[in-house]
Image: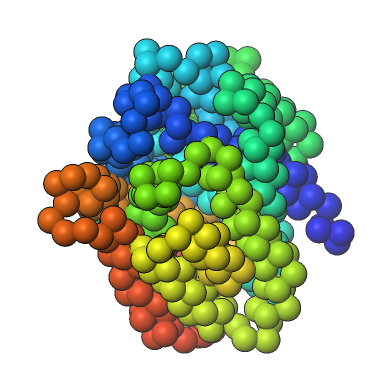
Amino acid sequence: MVKLPVLTHLCFTFFLYNFATFMTAPVIVDVTMSALCPGEIECSLAILLSGFQQAIIGLGSLVMMPLIGNLSDKYGRKALLTLPITLTIIPLAILAYSRSRNFFYAYYVFKILTSMFCEGSVHCLSLAYVADNVPEGRRASAFGILSGIGSSAFVCGTLSTRFLSTASTFQVATAMGMLSAVYMRVFLPDSIVNDNLSTPIMSEGKLDGIVNQDEESDKKIQMFKTLPSIEDMLVLLKSSLTFSQAAIVSFFSTLSDVGLHASLLYYLKARFHFNKDQFADLMVITGIAGTVSQLLLMPILAPVLGEAKLLSIGLFFNCVHMILYSIAWSFWVPYAAALFSLLYVFSQPCIRSIVSKQVGPCEQGKAQGFISGIGSFANVASPLLFSPLTALFLSERAPFNFPGFSIMCVGFASMIAFVQSLMIRAFPPISSERVSNWH
């Protein structure tokens, strides 16, 4: 960051954006249950609606992520970052105004619509921006630092929730979202890999409407050509065994992470009667451990062990901590399990670094968008699998008494990712010439 000041502006934008989105995480369960099942500790409707929401968002992201990554290769990262950062403000502002049942349903609809575009896109584009500006040998550490910035935003956001009312939480989140959009537009330099590919989509000529009709048609045609086809994706998978293995790992890793995210808070509320303050405490522990690991440990360990070994370590401890949640026998066990984030946070930055080394410099957006698209497919499948299972085993209709059964199943999905990661070997990066043949 000292040698590349442009990354400082990216990291600050990334921090503000994640601060705004993460600080609502501890309160959203209470808001949802208050709107749908007032006064109750267990609410199957809330679990099922949350799962349905995540599945629809994942379905939209599955289409949008590869397109966004591909467009960013053509038109620059900054223009594409503007849209998701701005759209994220809308659902936050709705709950900042009111959290009654009607406003909750409005939030629910707008959250689905905006997140279909926003979910994961800021992270994807930020990784591509880093890859544009950091040499291959230092990308694992740079990706780890970016993830550490996200984790520190997670800590600060969830910790601030501990001292704010529910209404104030959404109001502050809205203000921080607006600040991140303004800061990014003013200070972040654009990052276009090849200026000959296209002109920025937010150029002054377009904004003023002074564009020839034929030129406008040609540009629209060029934009539609950036839609990645199934054939493009298959070529991308076949181009490198390491890339295809990383895609499989990414799918099962995201499948388990989304399943845990969709189930854990409702499980803890039903099992140990956790509220927003205890959720915030748990998230702060997770965030602090993850931040320390990504900012201090990962830059040291990545050059020594390599991304492949570090990925396996992260996935192993991810599996262990999920299983520990599922068999929690006392209220303190989830806090102990949260400490495992010191090690399991290695997985996502390592996957992204491995992928970035398998493509050329002009294909970083496409590759990162493809991996985000794989994650979006997991976002569709995971809630459909695990949310009904969670609702069933937290209800009185459970076939046997095991409230954490769905989280145990999530841990098994993470175990599949761990086993697949053991098969990844570090191969030489794909040359840009070979990648350019896709066109």
Q: Is residue 115 left or right of residue 381?
A: right
Q: Which part of the image, by quadrant, shows the C terminus?
A: bottom left
Task: Decide if residue 373 is on the left or right side of residue 43.
Answer: right
**Left or right, residue 401 beside residue 83:** left
Identify the residue at horizontal 86%, vertical 61% (top origin).
3
Picture residue at 61% right of the left edge, 48% below the top = 281
Where is residue 408 shown, x and y percent of the image?
Answer: 31, 65
Q: Indicate how the structure is coloured in the image.
A: rainbow
Q: Residue furthest front?
A: 330
Q: Position of residue 50 (x, y in %)?
A: 33, 37
Q: Residue furthest right?
A: 2
The tally of labels here is 0
Look at the picture and state if 124 lies above or below 243. Answer: above
Res 277 visible = yes
Q: Tell me the residue at 87%/59% (across/down).
A: 2
Q: Where 234 sits versus 390, above or below?
A: below
Image position of 378 with respect to 343: above or below:
above
The answer to whether any part of residue 435 appears in the image is no
Front residue of 382/245: it is 382
Q: Position of residue 326 (x, y in %)?
A: 36, 63
* In this picture, residue 388 sits left or right of residue 68: left
The image quarter in which residue 238 lies: bottom left
Q: Quadrant of the N terminus?
A: bottom right
